[in-house]
Amino acid sequence: MGKVKEKPGPLARRPDNSAFKQQRLPAWSPMLTANTVLPFFYLMALICLLLGVWLLLTVQSTHEIKKDYTDLGTCQLCHEMRKDVSNANKPCSCRVDIPVEKALKGDVFIYYGLRNFHQNLRRYMDSRDDGQMLGRQNKLKDPSTYCMPFRKDKDGRPIAPCGAVANSMFNDTFILKYHGRSGPEVVPLLRTGITWYTDKNVKYRNPKTQENFTLAQEFNGTAKPPFWGKPVYELDEHNPINNGFINEALIVWMREAAFPNFKKLYGVLHRAQKPFINGLPVGNYSVEISYNFPVQYFRGRKEVVLTTLTWFGGQNHFLPIAYLVTSSLIFLMAVGLTVVWWKYGKGGKNMKA
Amino acid sequence: MARDGEDPGMAKTPKVKRQRKKKTKENKTRTVHANLLYDHAKGEENPNRHYANNKIKTTKYTVLSFLPKNLFEQFHRFANVYFVFIALLNFVPVVNAFQPELALAPVVFILSVTAIKDLWEDYRRHRSDKEINHMDCLVFSRVERRYVEKYWKEVRVGDFIKLRCNEILPADVLLLSSSDPDRLCHIETATLDGETNLKQRQVVRSFFDLDCDFDPLKYYSIIECEKPNNDLNRFRGYIIHRSGRRDALYKENLLLRGCTIRNTEEAVGIVIYAGHETKAMLNNNGPRYKRSKLERQMNVDVFWCVIILLVMCLFTAVGHGLWMFQYGDKRPVFDVLSPEGTDLSPIMSAIYLFLTMIIVFQVLIPISLFVSIEIVKICQVYFIHQDMELYDEETDSQLQCRALNITEDLGQMQYIFSDKTGTLTENKMVFRRCTVAGVEYSHDANARRLAMYQEMDSEEEECTSHGGTLPRRDSVASHQSARVVLRSQSTKSHRRTGSRAEAKRASILSKHTAFSSPMEKDITPDPQLLDKVNECSSQMEFMRFHSQPTSQLPSDLADIIDFFIALTVCNTVVVSSPNQPRQKVRMRFELKSPVKTIEDFIKRFTPSRLTSGSNSSSSSSLITSRSSNKGCSSMLSSPSAESTLTKLDEEKHHGSLEHAFSPVPPCYDGKAWNIEEGELRYEAESPDEAALVYAARAYKCSLVGRLPDQVTVELPHLGKLSFELLHTLGFDSTRKRMSVVVRHPLTDQITVYTKGADSVIMDLIKPPDTGNSKGKRQKKIVSRTQNYLNLYAADGLRTLCIAKKILSKEQYACWLQRHLEAETAIQGREELLFESALRLETNLQLLGATGIEDRLQDGVPETIASLRQAGLQIWVLTGDKQETAVNIAYACKLLDPEEEILTLNADSQEACALLLEESLHYIQAKFLCNSTDQSTKAFHNNFIPFDIYPSSSPSSSSSHTAPFMVHRLGLVIDGRTLAYALDKTLEDKFLAVARSCRSVLCCRSTPLQKSMVVKLVRNKLKVMTLAIGDGANDVSMIQVADVGVGISGQEGMQAVMASDFALPRFRYLKKLLLVHGHWCYSRLANMILYFFYKNAMFVALIFWYQFYCGFSGSAMIDQWYLIFFNLMFSAFPQLITGTLDKDVSAETLQQLPQLYVNGQNSEEYKPYMFWMNMIDAFYQSLICFFIPYFAYADSDVDLFTWGTPITTLALFTILVHLGIETKTWTWMNWLSISFSIALFFTVALCYNASCPTCYSPSNPYWTMQRLLQDPLFYLLCIITPIAALLPRYFYRACQGTLFPSPVQVGRQLDKLPAETRRNILSLSRVKVGSPLSPKPPFLSLSKPPVTGGNKKDQKSFPSSKTSQGPVLQTDQQGQRRGPTDSERGLSDLYTLVPTEIDTLPYTKDAPQLSEEQQSPQTKDSEGLDKSLETSDLSLSGWITSTPLLTQTDSIQLNLLPDGDAQCVRYTRDSVEKVKPAAQRTEQETGQPLHVTS
């Protein structure tokens, strides 16, 4: 027994004659036939071609040097040694020679690369506590359960930083040496400024309870992650500010890689002094590695990478090629459509009714 | 008369619980006491306390119960349970994938959207309930000893309420007193059944005789009646007085809730049923839920999605197990142990992972699909409602969608089952001609007048200022003159000034809706008949003056006068005056009736019964003798037989005719009798009745007043005669007739006038005694009348026979006694009354017959032609007789004069079987066997333009048998044969025959048969059926069909109530199906496919990633994006497209009905399309995954910095994909897409900037911000969507060029300039509309006319500049490309034809322009003849001729009545066109079919 809304007038129920209600909104209705889409196809082919060529030229200007040092030369020994878990704390170092045949101009970035390391496993990725890394006191003492089973050590002390991600941190160190005319020379590397600005300044912070506490005091009562040799506040021996949760190597590691084969930034060439003002000159280089990170359990590989970057990333030829391939595909289709249009569509056969 | 049968869906609705408790005690009846007696006894004592009170509550929820109840209801939907299950799964630590609270979000969102919708609806119900509950009414209060105002909700069973004029009844009330002197109460039941005429209700008999006002305080009776039920037309019970006397109660005593009191100043009644137990409320069923075909199809694919989901999960789980296994015992440093620190075996982790993956991949089962579909459907319904073209100005009504969820079914119909009367026709009955005593009065002037309406309609469309008016009925002369005269008279008429539509509307809007159209009212009398009437009445006057017995009148004149009296008297028409709407013109005749004799008489006749109370006053006999004239649909409605007897007796005593002749009634209230008689308004329940009364009035034989016990008729010369109404036997569908018993005031004889269907009446005619001349005359009359009846039927008129019978007093008394017994019987009353009626209506004397025209509605033939072109099979199921039906079918182009008609009339099961068998053979012989013959095929191609029969397409889901050809055959079957044919053993054969025929016509079918036919076709042929009807007899059919459409016409609201869609006119069906149906279907189908695509595409991205993360179930797409992608980011554009997209414009869809086949064959959504979309989805996701993958491979990218671009790319790809699929772009589309993108970026930016720790485990802080600074991101955004959508775009372009679907061609037509299009369409319409006309040249749009055409056009048709005008050409190329069969090749040219349907192309019109192509056509027609001849040879039967009108071929299968089962007559005629009608009827051998031309 619904109530009928009364409108005055004899045509009370007449619907409004508006374009919307009568479904007569002005509309653009594109027809997908050969003659309408052909210009678009040719245009797209051209655009993709131009972009592809441009990108290709850009990528050609970059230079990348990769060295897999897992069991290369003297590192073979260390590799063998790391197979035994009991040797975990014994230091081992080795040297890898890297000849640079073409100067790396501009900013040079040094990466470490890992292969077959699944940093993207779901449980692994979850095993961290962002609250703790933000320096929250309560989280420091009582890390989130996400960190399980690296939440507390056997004595019940909270682990800082907790979780599997931090625990498995890459801990090889590199010293890059330039063997120039004046003898071996350590290439200066910047180990800071390699993270996102927001990570360093927003997402990671050291715990701060009292003004005059040292970092070690702040972390008092916490345990280091089981796989680590040093506690978190001693990560960088050379730069005391770069310690604790804001250690940039830690921050870089904590940004979990998307793929099992990845590289992470180790340092940037400090272009303050000769001969590195313009990048890495041609010559022989070597890397002194303190070989700590075991990879044989997961059949992984380690590598060191020296590279320059373009405005759209590292040396990666895929994107220009993708553009060029797409361009040619579009072109082929366009040609096909042209044929179709010429033979069938031109006379408007499809328009018959 | 389509009002036979009662609503079949009379399921007993569950009663209120409280009452059920009571039921144990109370059993079958309800006892109602007056509340007044128990006012002092609080609560417990009151025997009525158990009955529901009058407070109604239609809400489903209360404040408290809303949440649990609503949730419970929502969980009935399986999908919701599934999603809740997944959300809960997320709370299990080992398997959780997302932040558990977040995973709840979509489910909560979906549930709350639905809950809010429910809440809103419920609130609306609550408000309307409240409003209704708080209406006022007057209830008698014992304390105050008067009627006090109370709210409706306070009314209880047993209360006395006082009703005033124009008040709405608050409950079902037993009428105890009325201010009306006749103790009547008029009600309008429009809200209940939509019938707008007044109904009379009657005070309970024992309260008739109260002189003073009814005093509730003196009421001590107890009422026993039925339990509440929903049958509006039934109420039985009795009232027990304190004296112990019982009086029966009828439905005439009951006033139903929701009705409005009219014409009655005050009425008092006692509440019998209140609140939810009232009949109105019990009849109030909510909207119905049907599941559409598309949804069924979709559910299959949802099921497939589940399978895909499980396969993907299983794959991942096994992969993870293997991945774990390959590391052996040595656990890699990144393999995290379980929280407990224990090792997980690969198998266990695989099992856990399986569950995790179900959560991660849940998006594949589209949670928002169901909600989106609902939203889109609501929008679609809204737009259908808003369509101006579906709005009928005349009735101020528009289309109503009552079923909200089957809009897309409208686009997939294959069979239409239509009622005839009121659906195809206007149900405006116009008296056309009559035959009296064997003489036909052709009423030519009347026919001319009717023809003029048609003309005027068309003229007035152009110039409305010129008031096309109708002559007034008394200006007889003018009718015979030319139309100019009529025009000149137009100024006089105040009624018809505007167009017919306006006038109609005006008349409808004025309160008397029923029969006020001048077309129906103003009948031009036949001059010959008019003369006779005049002569006759003057003679009678003379005789009366000289006190001669009127029996001396010449019998033909007597018949004429009787005929008109019967027309006037034998009905239930109510007379009212228009100036005072609903004001009954009252004429009271005081009958002096001594009390003593009544009582004596009653005692003598019915000794067992009590007299009608002690307080019989002088007026008692008058009052007690009221017989109701109500009850057209009820079996019988005359309660007061005993008092009729008393009157009889009394008349005997007095023996005077004087009082009956009182020339001017001594008293009639209010208005003087000077109201012009023409101004009287007749309100009838059935349009036929009104038509007849108006017809009689045209002969000055007008009905001027009707009271329950008498009818006043004004005759020429004689003045007003009042017929004492002794009895009314109402019309019903089983008897198919109605009778009145009156005392004829002139002859003082008790006369029975019967009016009814000719088939029934003819059987009841007294077999004439051939001995004397009178008998011979009778016989002649009968045979002649029969003859004319056939003629009328052949003209498509509805025929009614009028007969009379004279009873002696003894006969009547004898019948009456038995009738009384029947009436008072409690058990089996209906049957007894039926038998009683049968006893009365025998041995009738035939007076004559009438032919009433039921005019076709506007646009019916065009609509039927369009629908048929659209590939719809149209069956007409009607209750009319065969001839009428066939002729209406011709009139509305359902049957074509050129096509053959198979007529099935059988008397027995075996005969029917044989007929069907023979028909099948005939069809096979004629069509299938010859189908190899080239010429026959050409015949098909040329002559069957409509047989785009869906099942002929091999991929059609509907065809479960071999493709059936639809031939150019019409099948006509009558009800009796239909009953046999619907038998289990024969139904297959019947269907085989019927489906081969282009049109099927079932005559004389009952409502049940109608629904059985629909059910049969629906279930056996697996087709989509639509039933359309307007009356109560169509209800069952409407309910059975997939889509039921009601015509909201004059027949009341039952059909509309049962329907899914209600249309004002039949012609709107065209737009509803062809345009809205097509749109709804294609929109929804595309949207559903898109949904599946979208989700699969999105989920596959994560699936591919599993190969790179050790199948560990991690997702590069942040959980927020994953969960809200479907719900927010990509939701709006598809809703807009799903609501607004138009593949073809409405104009083209209507002009090219062939496009409808698209939906019938489910071409927008076929099973393979789902898989194609899936494959496309997987391809696109591969692109969207691997381009970013390789672009970032071997870099230092982190998971979310890589995953966010992928999400963005996927969004872009999905939106552009939608763009490709969108056919029309309005600003809404642009807006929604921009909005989606903006929303995504806004949400992403906010989310990524909001909190560095809140969303563990994922932490995408500042990711989006950094990405927006990264050129690589933009480079990816360009290349990926292009590469992903390239194949689809290319395919679409190729398809549009090489093999466009019909719909695409339609779209291309849309693009053409309007003029060109009109040319093309008009040509195609000519071609389609008249299949046999010389075929129009095949046209090619390749060279559209450009006479200074616009630039755009020239651009798209570069070669068009040279051409002049539409160049019509045969496409030689097409001919070359086509198959070897040249006919096929030709038909292929018609590119609307999808290539799959090659057996039955759309167009059978082979292109032809040149001379040489003319020849095949002539060959074709030769071929036709040849094929017919061969079929003739194959049939060795009698061949006689029964041509139907002008048709060339008709085959009639008649079984000879002598029962020789093997004798099947094939009646065929293609040469002899016309035979004298009479001759053939003579040779008829008793078979019901008489076909004349």
Image (tube, rainbow, N blue to C red):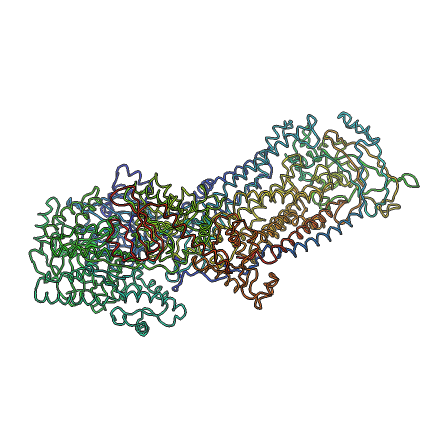
Q: Quadrant of residue B1105?
A: top right
Q: Position of residue B1110 (x, y in %)?
A: 66, 34
Say whether residue B126 is visible: no
Q: Quadrant of residue B568?
A: bottom left
Q: Position of residue B772 (x, y in %)?
A: 11, 55
- For this orientation, the residue located farthest to the right is A182
Residue A308 lies, with reference to residue B335, above or below; the image says below
Q: Position of residue B1434 (x, y in %)?
A: 37, 45
Say whether residue B320 is visible: yes
Compare residues B295 and A140 and report the one nearer the observer.
Answer: B295
Count the labels in the image.
0
Q: Is residue B761 left or right of residue B1198?
A: left
Residue A297 lies, with reference to residue B1319, above or below; the image says above
Compare residues A198 and B1066 and report the one nearer the observer.
Answer: B1066
Residue B363 lies, with reference to residue A77, above or below; the image says below
Q: Quadrant of the C terminus of chain B?
A: bottom left
Q: Is residue B789 left or right of residue A53?
A: left
Compare residues B1395 and A320 and report the one nearer the observer.
Answer: B1395
Compare residues B1325 and B599 and report the one nearer the observer.
Answer: B1325
Q: Position of residue B1438 (x, y in %)?
A: 30, 47
- For this orientation, the residue located farthest to the left is B653
